Image: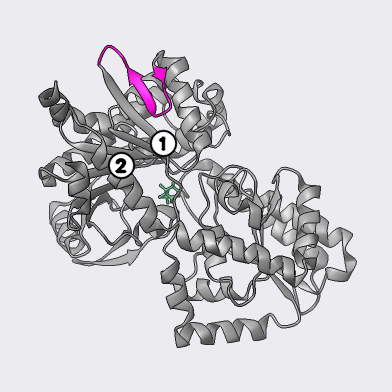
Amino acid sequence: DGRHMASNSRQRLLVVANRLPVSATRIGDTWSLELSAGGLVSALLGVRQFETRWIGWAGVNVADEVGQVALKNALEEKRCVPVFLDEETVHQYYNGYCNNVLWPLFHYLGLPQEDRLSATRSLEDQFEAYKRANSKFADVVQSIYKEGDVIWCHDYHLMFLPKCLKDYDINMKVGWFLHTPFPSSEIYRMLPSRSELLKAVLCADLIGFHTYDYARHFVSACTRILGLEGTRSGVEDHPLGKLTRVAAFPIGIDPERFSEALSRPDVKGYIQELQQKFSGRKVMLGVDRLDTIKGIPQKLLAFEKFLDENVEWRDKVLLVQIAVPTRTDVHDYQRLTSQVHEIVGRINGRFGTLTTVPIHHLDRSLDFHRLCALYAVTDVAIVTSLRDGMNLVSYEFVACQNMKKGVLILSELAGAAQSLGAGAILVNPWNISDVAVAIKDALDMPETDREECHRHNFEHVTTHTAQVWADTFVSELNDTIVEAELRTRR
Ligand code: G6P
């Protein structure tokens, strides 16, 4: 039965996500592969108990067959199987429906207004492209599927995939997990394709979210929009006699990856270097993808207000903001870049001196080991997401803070507020004055309070790991009953 299979350590897990954990760059006839950023990637890196295969978009356009074969072979070593999408599909599916429609809607930013729509085709066209792309992922899954495999579909890019897979073989074990918030049904119901998407997701055997609230919102969308019955364990479709299990499975990180990094001599060297560079100043740190949902302008404005109101801190604090460019072909992301640059420029112009500036802003990602060193020397980490599925930056910071026991300022609108809230200063990121006060409180927090907060957070981060998350989800998925078993039991 399911439990027996779960205890078999070499069960195959097919992880299907829009993005593979490696990004590929073509150099002549060969491919160079690099580990890519993102919460999901860092979480699944920690999962070692399954024989995992990744299926996902390689992130590049490979039009020729020779190139496709070469990339496929290169990726095989990393246990990755690529899905090839042409440029037009990427535009309509990834830039369009995923990141200009579903992403903002799920983060309570609404649907694209006309000025955002006119650059792309209609919502219907984008939805058609979305379905076509999802069925391409399904084709690749089918091509490697073996009986006994468990399939785990990830995120808002692949809401149609559970249906595609079950249409192919009703006996496949299919789970689907959403890494973003699932919004209130009052927001979700704006989506023109709301019913079709919900029905497609409900084909899965198990549906997971980061928090109980997201799961509850999903179930009420199914009751209100589809008229199905929501129960404590999921959504019931009476005519079909099918129950889809819906539950919360909060994700975590692989904390050992960080503690191991911090014990490396080169990382210790980076830490010393940074301590020298930053000496005499408290270090505040923001690490975000450059995304509207991360509330970077709001964070900068709060920092500006803090500097305005606290003259004594002006040359004693530095905000390091790492803003990793992402989805650069989407209009809102382009606009955000210039908006952020403008604010940073103004604040540095206002409060900088001949030799120092208050904000050190980088438009790029850092190498993992340097990032760990940066986390370790930070006094205050600040996460001001306007909405965020979970936010693992807050977890990563905690994992690296055994030395400093720094303070976490955390948006109450991030999923992580439910797990790290008791050990953080919680803020409403829209309330600039409140965040400015939180910055001061964080910088002034006495050591005993900092230690207590850190102890609480560290305990959580080291026990609620990515491994635990994946284990719990996959064993629960194994325990769900698929159609064939139902039929034999009847
Ligand atoms: C979020 C999403 C992931 C996505 C990541 C990076 O964390 O939930 O599915 O991979 O952002 O975004 P990108 O568009 O670059 O893949």
Residue 224, image x and y in percent? Answer: 47, 16
Q: Which mark is residue 247?
A: 1
User: Left of 442 or right of it: where is 68?
Assistant: left
| Label 2, ligand 1: CB separation under 8 Å | no
Identify the residue at image location x=72%, y=61%.
345
Which residues fall within the magenta stretch? 229-240
Q: Is residue 233 magenta?
A: yes
> Disc 1 on helix, strand or loop?
strand
What residue type is disc 1 on? Ala
Q: Which mark is residue 476?
A: 2
Q: Is residue 214 above or below residue 15?
A: above
What residue type is disc 2 on? Glu
Q: Is residue 288 magenta?
A: no
Identify the residue at image location x=51%, y=21%.
190
Residue neighbourhood size for the residue with mark 1, other residues' Cα within 10 Å, grouped as few (<14), some (14–19), many (≥20): many
User: Left of 412 or right of it: where is 137?
Assistant: left
